[in-house]
Image (cartoon, rainbow, N blue to C red):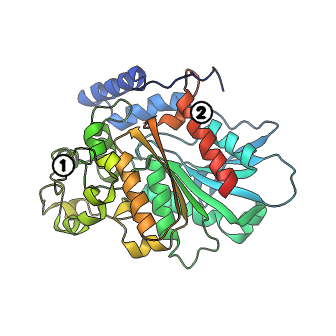
C-alpha cells in the first residue's frame, strides 16, 4: 500500500479524477465512438493488478461453476477451520473489478487478519449484460462455495461464512442472502451479510439523502440513476423516466410502503425534508423493464416474511452519499423483522470511501472504515 493516510478526511472528497473520467466517457458516447460505461471500464482497467501471492496470502484466479473469481487463501498454519467471505465489488453493475488494487488490498488484508478465505467475484457487467446476469453470477458462486466438499477443500468452517460487498456489490450481496435461504439445493448457510453503503431500492430517488447529496462528487444522483438504468437496459428512455420520477407502475405503487422514508428513517436522516409519494405511474414500464421492482434487483422491496429469516447484518452508511437512506431504511426493516443488525454510520463518510486506501488516494476515512469492517468480522464471524 503506497503512501501514508491523511490525518483528516476532507469534508468533500477530491473529485477531479472522477469528473475527468466521466467527462471523457460522456464526450466519447456523444460522438458515437463508444458506450459511456465501456469508456469508464477501460479507464478503470488501469487500476487492476495481477494475482500475486506473498508470505501471508496465496492468491489465485480461477472459476467457480464457470464464474471467474479471485481467491485469497491465508498462509497461516493455525490449527482449526477458517472463516470465509464471499466479496462482491462495487461499480454500479457496470464498472469495477475484483482485480482492482483497492479490492486486492482489502481482500489480502481480510484474508491475513481474519485467517479467512476470501472469494472475490468477477461477475458480468452492463452494458453487455443486464439484470439478472450480475445477480445470477454472484448467486452461482455463493451456492457453489457453500457445497460441503468445496468448503472442506478450503478448510472452511461451514458455520462461519459471510457474504459481503460495497455499493452495487452490497446490493448483490443482500439480494443473494435473501434468495439463497429459499434454495433447497444449497448445502451450507450464510452466517453474516456485511453491506457497505448498498444500493437497495428503485422506487424513490428523492429520499433525503438523494436530495441532500444530489451533486456530491464520486456518486451524484445523475450517475447513480445512470447506473440503475444501465443495470436493466440500454434504452435511454428508462434513464429519462427515472430522472423525471415517472418510472412508477401500479405494481410499484403497492410497494411504496416498503420504502416510505417518513416512517423508516430516524429524524437525524429525515431532517426537514418533506415526504412525497414517489412518481407518476407509467403503464408501459413493467412490460419494457420487467425486473426493475424485482427484490433480486432491489432487496429493500422484499416482503417482511422473507426478511425474518435473514442472517445477522452489518450495514455501513455514509452521510455524504445518495444511498445513505437505502441502507438506513434496510436497517429499520430488518430490525422490525427481528433480524440482528449492526449499523455503522460515518458522519464524515462519502460514497466509495472504503476504496480510498491506496496511493495517491490513501485517506484516513478509508483506512478507518476498512479497519472497523475487518475488526467487526474478527469479533463476529
Position of 156 with respect to 324 (left or right) is right
**Which residue extends farthest front?**
267
Q: Is residue 279 above or below residue 362?
A: below
**Quarter of the picture holding the C terminus:** bottom right
Position of 221 with respect to 115 (left or right) is left
Viewer-nearest residue: 17 or 323: 323
Q: Tell me which residue sits at (39%, 32%) in the image.
A: 218
Q: Tell me which residue sits at (59%, 66%) in the image.
A: 143
**Quarter of the picture holding the N terminus:** top right
How many residues crowd around disc 2 within 10 Å: few (fewer than 14), some, or many (20 or more)? many
Viewer-nearest residue: 250 or 11: 11
Where does the image place residue 212, in percent across and percent down from the top left? 28, 38
Question: Which numbered circle lies on residue 367?
Answer: 2
Position of 365 with respect to 203 (left or right) is right
Q: Is residue 205 above or below residue 367?
A: below
| Mark 1 → mark 2, Cα distance in angstroms | 35 Å
Of helix, strand and loop, which one carries label 2?
helix
Question: Which numbered circle lies on residue 16?
Answer: none
Regarding residue 159, the answer to whether it shows in the image is yes
Regarding residue 381, the answer to whether it shows in the image is no
Q: Tell me which residue sits at (75%, 49%) in the image.
A: 73
Viewer-nearest residue: 326 or 339: 339
Where does the image place residue 363, in percent across and percent down from the top left? 55, 26
Where does the image place residue 348, in percent across and percent down from the top left? 45, 33
What residue does disc 1 label?
Answer: 274
Of helix, strand and loop, which one carries label 1?
loop
Q: Is residue 329 above or below residue 350?
A: below
Q: Quarter-wise, where is residue 175 in the image?
A: bottom left
Amino acid at each position: 500500500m503506497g503512501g501514508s493516510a491523511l490525518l483528516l478526511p476532507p469534508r468533500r472528497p477530491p473529485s477531479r479524477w472522477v469528473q475527468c473520467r466521466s467527462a471523457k466517457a460522456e464526450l466519447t458516447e456523444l460522438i458515437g465512438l463508444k458506450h459511456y460505461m465501456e469508456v469508464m471500464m477501460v479507464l478503470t482497467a488501469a487500476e487492476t493488478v495481477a494475482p500475486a501471492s506473498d508470505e501471508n496470502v496465496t492468491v489465485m484466479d480461477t472459476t467457480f461453476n464457470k464464474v471467474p473469481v479471485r481467491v485469497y487463501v491465508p498462509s497461516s498454519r493455525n490449527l482449526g477451520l477458517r472463516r470465509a467471505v464471499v466479496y462482491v465489488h462495487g461499480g454500479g453493475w457496470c464498472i469495477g473489478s475484483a482485480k482492482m488494487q483497492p479490492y486486492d488490498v482489502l481482500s489480502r488484508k481480510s484474508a491475513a487478519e481474519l485467517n479467512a478465505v476470501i472469494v472475490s467475484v468477477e461477475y458480468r457487467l452492463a452494458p453487455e449484460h443486464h439484470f439478472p446476469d450480475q445477480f445470477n453470477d454472484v448467486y452461482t458462486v455463493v451456492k457453489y462455495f457453500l457445497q460441503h466438499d468445496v468448503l472442506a477443500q478450503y478448510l472452511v468452517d461451514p458455520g462461519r461464512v459471510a457474504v459481503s460487498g460495497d455499493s452495487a456489490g452490497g446490493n448483490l450481496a443482500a439480494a443473494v442472502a435473501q434468495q439463497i435461504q429459499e434454495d433447497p439445493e444449497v448445502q451450507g448457510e450464510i452466517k453474516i451479510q456485511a453491506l457497505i453503503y448498498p444500493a437497495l431500492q428503485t422506487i424513490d430517488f428523492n429520499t433525503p439523502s438523494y436530495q441532500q447529496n444530489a451533486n456530491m462528487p464520486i456518486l451524484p444522483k445523475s450517475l447513480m440513476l445512470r447506473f440503475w438504468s444501465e443495470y436493466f437496459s440500454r434504452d435511454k428512455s428508462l434513464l429519462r423516466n427515472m430522472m423525471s420520477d415517472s418510472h412508477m407502475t401500479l405494481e410499484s405503487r403497492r410497494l411504496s410502503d416498503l420504502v416510505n422514508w417518513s416512517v423508516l428513517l430516524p429524524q437525524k436522516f429525515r431532517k426537514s425534508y418533506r415526504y412525497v409519494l414517489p412518481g407518476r405511474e407509467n403503464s408501459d414500464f413493467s412490460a419494457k423493464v420487467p425486473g426493475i421492482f424485482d427484490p433480486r434487483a432491489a432487496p429493500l422491496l422484499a416482503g417482511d416474511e422473507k426478511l425474518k429469516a435473514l442472517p445477522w447484518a452489518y450495514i455501513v452508511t455514509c452521510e455524504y452519499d445518495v444511498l445513505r437512506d437505502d441502507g438506513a431504511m434496510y436497517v429499520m426493516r430488518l430490525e422490525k423483522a427481528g433480524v440482528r443488525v449492526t449499523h455503522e454510520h460515518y458522519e464524515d463518510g462519502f460514497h466509495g470511501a472504503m476504496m480510498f486506501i491506496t496511493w495517491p488516494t490513501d485517506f484516513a476515512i478509508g483506512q478507518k472504515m476498512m479497519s472497523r469492517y475487518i475488526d467487526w468480522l474478527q469479533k463476529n464471524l
